[in-house]
Structure formats: C-alpha cells, structure tokens
Image: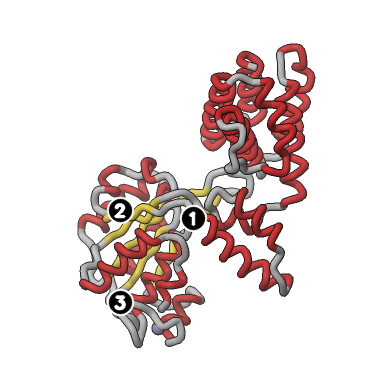
Amino acid sequence: MSFDNILGQDRPKQTLDKALRRGRIPNAYLFYGQESVGKKFTAIEVSKALNCKTLAPVDSCDRCTSCLKIEKRIHPDLFILEPKKSSPTSREAILKIDEIRELQKKLLYLPYEGNIKVAIINNAECMNPQAANSFLKTLEEPPTKTLIILIASNPYQLLPTVVSRCQGIRFYPLPSEAIKTIISHHLKNEAGESQPEEIELRSRRSMGQVAYALEEDLLEASEEREELIRLLSIISFKRMDQVFLWTKAKAKKTERILLILDELTRILRDVVLIKVAPETSVVTNKDLIKPLRALALQKSTPALLTMFETVQNTKAVIKLNANTQLALENMLINFCEVA
Ligand SMILES: [Zn+2]
C-alpha cells in the first residue's frame, strides 16, 4: 500500500485515508507545517491514490501506468506549481499571476486520462497578492473533477479568504525514528552500507526535517558550531572588533546565513536546556557538551532567552531582504547588551 510510504505523519495520513475511503474529498486541501516534513510527498501519494488504475480511489499500487507517470511527474492530469526566483540574486522565490492563470486554463478541461486532476501548489504563501486574488476565484468556483492541494510552511502569510476555502491538514516535525529510516535508506543507496553514528548525528540535528537531515555538510557544520560557541563566550562591548569581523565574514555567505542562524538557535537552546536540567539527554550538540556547559555557567537564563528571541527576529528581517550585515550587527550588539 503506497500510503505506507508516508512515514511519521500518522495523523494527516489517517485523515486522508478516511476521506478517500468515504469518498469525501474536498475541493481543496491546505497541507501546512514546517518545511521538509513530507507535505509534498503526501500530496503526490494522494494524487496516485485518486488516479491509480487498480486501487483508486482509496490507495495506489505504485506499479500501474498512472502511478508511474505521477511518480515521474509526467501525468497529464497532475499539475505542480513551484515558486521561482525572479533573478539569480533575489532571495525570495515567488508565484506570479501568469503561472496561476495558465494553471486555471488547464483546470477548465476534463481529466485527460485519469479520474481527477490534481493541482499541487508548493509554497503557496509565495503567491504574490495578484496571483493569490486570482487564485481565490478558482477556490470560489472550483473546476469539476479537480483537487487542489496548497502546501505552505507559513500559512499565516496566505490570504485568510484562501485559507478559509481549504480543508487544513497540519503536518508535524518528523519523529526521529522516521528520520532515521529515511536517512539510512538514502545513505545506504549511496554508500552501500549504513553508518549508525552518522545517522544518529544527522537525525538529532535535523529538527524533524528530511532535507536538512540528508543534505547537511557535517564538516562545515562542525566548524561553524565551534566558531559560534567561541563567539558567544567572548561577546561583549569590549570585544566589538570580533563582532564586526564575524558579521563582515558571515554577511557574505548569503546562501548560508539562515542556516548559520538556525545553528545559533540550536546552540542557545542547548545552553538553556543545560542550565535548567544539567543532566539532560535532549541536547542536540551532544559532542560539544563541555564548551556548552561552560557557556551555561557564564550566561544567565534571561540573557540566553533574549538572545534566542533576537536570533528569531534577525532571521525574520533577513528573510524580508534587510541588509544582512546590518541585521547581524544589530543582533550582536543586542547580545553585548545582555551578555
Ligand atoms: Zn497504481
């Protein structure tokens, strides 16, 4: 059963399974939850189940021509929209009205060879206002034999009128067992054997997100973590030279800066955990427990919590295209004030 391919999302799976079995599929779903936890994967599995030549509409066989075409994304009744960057240097990808209009045209026709057309809009919050308003019309007057699946990591950025016309299904961070199964499957494929230590480390650092668990450069991450811990231990108004050196170097790494800030978040979280429960086993950076304990002795809990919040705010303004170097400097000056 192909729904079995969906790992670690038992609640969404149950809801969808029930809807398929009762034949009560709404016109539109909104799959929401943090990035890389299986939302798009699940949307594809739903498309297969609805169109499978042997098991539709309750499940899919993963072997018929329909399932295979959907798997390869070449089924004529499957439409997937992904936001694109308007230029190589722009930080945010968007979904433009032209693409939405083109999709709307395609949805006017009956299914070409399947039972139902499925339109998957990934990162739907990237629709610009014109695109979202135009798309609202499709949700208000849904085309026949069509299921729309909106996928969003930040659903609060969608128009409330769009959200209210979809049945929401929340996805959760993946449990570590599911992450481990996925990682070991992929690592095995590449290296021919599994490496338990690497799987453990990747799973612990993944925060329940598959892409992170699979793609992270562990060596680079290890150097970055040590550098961040050092920065936190020396930060003060007396060492502003270090602050400016660090921000200048990191501001150039535009591709990685949000990951570096995530790293900083995990370190601060670890230090707080060590402070409140010194014997804790839930620390992410277990291999760096010694320098983390030293930081825990040095910083107060309120200071750490303020830093934590400052990092979240910094991430938000960088995502909104603020000047990265200035944003990082502001963050560290704030750190100096509470350090
Ligand atoms: Zn099939």
- Decide if residue 83 is on the left or right side of residue 223: left
Dot 3 amino acid type: Val
- Label 1 environment density (alpha carbons within 10 Å; few <14, some 14–19, many ≥20): many
Q: Nearer the viewer, residue 176 or 186?
A: 176
Read off the residue under disc 1: 174
Measured in 3D between alpha carbons, the distance from the residue under mark 2 to the one under mark 3, in whole angstroms, is: 20 Å
Q: Looking at the picture, how far across and down is residue 17, in whole percent?
A: 31, 69
Q: Of label 1 and label 3, which has the lower sequence position?
A: 3
Numbered tag placed on residue 58 in the rendering: 3
Read off the residue under disc 2: 168
Please tell me whether mark 2 or mark 1 is closer to you in this view: 1
Is ligand 1 closer than 8 angstroms to the Cβ of mark 3? Answer: no
- Label 3 environment density (alpha carbons within 10 Å; few <14, some 14–19, many ≥20): many
Compared to residue 24, the image places residue 82 above or below, namely: above
Q: Nearer the viewer, residue 136 or 168?
A: 168
Compared to residue 154, the image places residue 101 above or below, namely: below
Q: Looking at the picture, how far across and down is residue 186, in whole percent?
A: 63, 68
Q: Quadrant of the N terminus?
A: bottom left
Q: Looking at the picture, how far across and down is residue 169, in whole percent?
A: 33, 55
